[in-house]
Image (cartoon, helix red, strand yellow):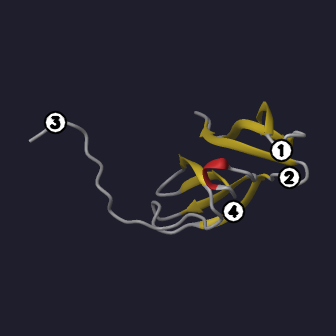
Amino acid sequence: MSNEPRIEVLETGHIDRHDSAFATLVMLDGQAILCGFSVEGGAHATGGTHCSRSEDGGRTWTPQGVILEGISQPVISNHLRLSRTASGTIIAYGQRDYREMTEQRDQTSRCEAGVC
C-alpha cells in the first residue's frame, strides 16, 4: 500500500450555477463554511465575486450575495479570495481586470490589486 495522500469524495453538489470558478473556502465556527467564487465565464471569469454559506459542513449552500460586482460595459471583472484573520475578520483580496477590445479585435487587460 502506498503512503501517498488520498482524497476521498464523500458527497458532491453545487455551490452556485452561474458558470463560476476559482472558489475559496473559509472555515467559520462549528460546521459553517463561507465560499467566495468568481461568477460568469468559467475559467475566463468575466463577472464579479459572490459568496455562499454552508451551515452543515458543505452539504448544502445558501447564496449570501455579492462581494464585488463585475461591470459589463466596459468589461471589468474581479477575482477575489477570502481569508480569515486570527481575530476572526473575513477579508477579500485579489485583482480587478479592465478588459478592452483593440482595433484588431484583440482583448487587452490591465489589472489592479485590491483589498475589500
- What residue is disc 1 on? 105
What amino acid is at disc 3? Asn
Q: Mark 1 and mark 2 in contact? Answer it, CB < 8 Å.
A: no
Which residue is outermost to the front? 104
Say which label, 1 or 4, has the lower sequence index: 4
- Identify the image quadrant of residue 9: bottom left
Say which label, 2 or 3, has the lower sequence index: 3
- What residue is disc 4 on? 64
Callout in the foreground (1, 3): 1
- What residue is disc 3 on? 3
Q: Residue at x 66, y 48 (%)?
A: 44
Residue 6 at x, y percent in the picture: 25, 45
Query: Front-most of 109 and 7?
Result: 109
Callout in the foreground (1, 2): 1
Say which label, 2 or 4, has the lower sequence index: 4
- Where the N terminus falls, by quadrant? top left
Callout in the foreground (1, 4): 1
Q: Is residue 10 left or right of residue 20?
A: left
Which residue is outermost to the left? 1
What is the CA distance from the residue labelled 1 to the residue labelled 4? 37 Å
Q: Secondary structure at mark 3?
A: loop
Q: Judge the density around disc 2: few (<14), some (14-19), many (≥20) Cα neighbours within 10 Å.
A: some
Q: Judge the density around disc 3: few (<14), some (14-19), many (≥20) Cα neighbours within 10 Å.
A: few
Say which label, 1 or 2, has the lower sequence index: 2
Q: Is residue 111 left or right of residue 83?
A: right
Say which label, 3 or 4, has the lower sequence index: 3
Q: Residue at x 56, y 67 (%)?
A: 61
Q: Residue at x 83, y 44 (%)?
A: 105
- What residue is disc 2 on? 71
